[in-house]
Amino acid sequence: MVYPEFVPQTFRFSPRPNNAHLIHWREWNEEAFQQAQKGDKPVYLSLSAVWCHWCHVFDETTLSDPQVIETLNRDFICIRVDADKNPHIQGRYLAGGWPTSAFLTPRRDIIVAGTYMYPEDFRSLANRVSEHYRHNKDELYARMARYKIERGIERERRCLPKEGLTEEIPKKVFNSIKKSFDPIHGGFGTEPKFPQPEVIEFLIKESLFNPPAGETNVLDGLEMAQKSLDGMMRGELWDAVEKGFFRYCTKANWTVPHYEKMLEGNAGLLKDYLLGYQATGNESYRVIAEGILHYTGTRLYAPDGGFYGSQDADEEYYRLDAQERGKAIPPVVDECIYTNWNGQIISQYLLAHQSLGHKSASGGLEKATRTLNFLKERAYKKGHGMRHYTVIGEGGSTTPDRGLGGLLTDQVYTVEALLTAYQTTAKREYLQWATDLIDYTITALGDSTGGGFFDVSEEVTSIEGLSSREKPFLENSAAARALIRLSYLTGQERYKKEALNALRTFLDTYEDYSLQAATFALAVREYLTYPVRIFIVGRESDADTLALHQEALKTPSSARVSPHGKGLEASLAWKIVRVLDPATDPLKIGQLTFPQQESAVAYVCKEGACSPPLAHPADLRKFLIGK
């Protein structure tokens, strides 16, 4: 859905002096490519980000070079795209990192692309591209046409029926992760060293599921996760003064960081340290989690709700000590509220409320629900999904620059947040909203023939002039996890079938993604493993209902259900909690039907078996973990 008040973005350059604005930049739109076709010129696409240190350096050096400016203005149609505001364009043209320089045909096909280049290298490449396009245009288009045919054949092959999901998938992903683990410093790979929060989540949760007989991978997984958590918090990736994590380190031992701080990255690491705290009881992990809550809840939190996207890198500032930093002007914050990243941080603030409870002074529940209200008011349209971002203007008003709707990433991570909010608060409005978004996602973004979900709607494809729709691996994996949760919350099997179709789409390719397959493997594990479902039957306003609900939420994911009966032994790493109010909710969920009681009771269910009614929080806790 493209909202009528959408106005194209203004260009954002380095905050330091530069001449990049002298290039004749155009927006990504049909008019720009029509000008390229009319002038028979190739397109220069610059993908940049407001937080990106090397993007700023690129603006100040290469894109400020007089000869570069002259060449680009003379021989190319130049388009500048903010990567954060346009993930659908980034997903198609990013060349390994930011800044990306991509030279395209007027038909939007890539001729060549790369990241940061020095002025002399960039001039040489631009001249070669211009020359090649002028003299070899027909051969260039013929080669691209052959590539598209081959790619179409490969896509059709991948849509053929595949075998089902098996336990071998998470095992294979685990072994791939294990090969890249750094046993000395923690983390994965050599350098530069990125945090990889999805990998750590997979390792922790995989360690908490029932291991196959004779396997030792479970202990290894938790050890790898702990080594990584310890390395990151003790190294320079962690800002010991103002809290929060930087984006990555250039050295394998977690030193020499790039100093930008991302809402997305801190959301992922907040989840990891909370899960690490639950799994091990390590108080230092709780302290780090509180630090992330403090940083994001102060520096990135907007006055009216919502979290800003990032804080700029500034090497000089972050090298100051605490007293000196207090006197200096802090790096610029990007006051743009991205829906997908806000969905991620909301989920983790709610997890913090469940995990830490009275131990946390962050006000996580209030900030999370307030941000959901903000997104509902300014980024949601019933039946049309979420739009991608909102910019807050002076006085708290929303500017016209409000982004596109119809992007998969926004729907998926908002649904994830809503399902967590529903389980945390028992407010049905969150479940209703999540169901509306999922149904929109299935209708507007689902592939009814091949399975899985496209990154953009057909409407966005048309308006943005995209040649095809893509199926992003990470977002499809996350969508599958959300669908599985929704299926167990509502008892509707159709959502689990959609999850299966999404996962089967990548059965031929998931091993190619290496570390990036962690979320896929976790989705497969959750698909194959029946969760522990805790149903609280009682009036929502009753104190007894609230007490049972709070007890169900705070039981740590590292605990296991005690062996009280056949089918009830299970890990609480995969847990669903729902409050059923007899006055407003049906007491039949899927194949389960619960009798109405005079007072609130809890039932713990695993597959077809449920516990007796448990009337007191202590009874529920004892049934769950034997204490």
Image (spheres, grey):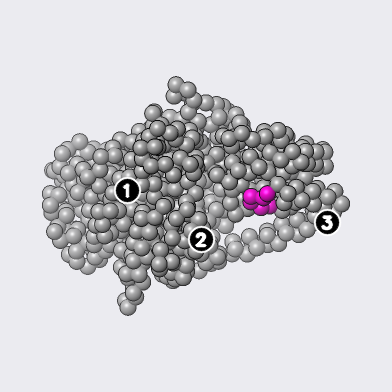
Labels 3, 1: front one: 1
Labels 2, 3: front one: 2
Residue 171 seen anywhere in this rendered image of the structure: yes
Q: Residues within 10 Å of mark 2 (few under 14, many from 20)?
A: few
Residue under label 2: 191
Could you tell me which residue is drawn at 85 percent across and 48 percent down? Answer: 134
Name the residue furthest right.
Answer: 135
Question: Residue 153 location in percent, x, y?
Answer: 68, 62
Could you tell me which residue is drawn at 61 percent across and 31 percent down? Answer: 10
Q: Earlier in the sequence, mark 3 or mark 1?
A: 3
Residue under label 1: 289
Question: Residue 539 location in percent, x, y?
Answer: 20, 39
Residues rendered magenta in the picture: 113-118
* Residue type indicated by callout 2: Glu
Residue 429 seen anywhere in this rendered image of the structure: no
Residue under label 3: 139
For residue 326, side relative to residue 449 (left or right): left
Question: Residue 55 location in percent, x, y?
Answer: 59, 43
**Which residue is nearer to you in this view: 593 or 602?**
602
Q: Is residue 565 magenta?
A: no
Labels 1, 2: front one: 2
Could you tell me which residue is drawn at 64 percent across and 35 percent down? Answer: 18
**Which residue is nearer to you in this view: 461 or 177?**
177
For residue 585, side relative to residue 378 (left or right): left
Q: Helix or strand or loop: what does disc 2 sit on?
A: loop
Question: Residue 84 location in percent, x, y?
Answer: 54, 42
Q: Helix or strand or loop: what does disc 1 sit on?
A: helix
Q: Helix or strand or loop: what does disc 3 sit on?
A: helix
Q: Earlier in the sequence, mark 1 or mark 2?
A: 2
Q: Is residue 213 above or below residue 599?
A: below
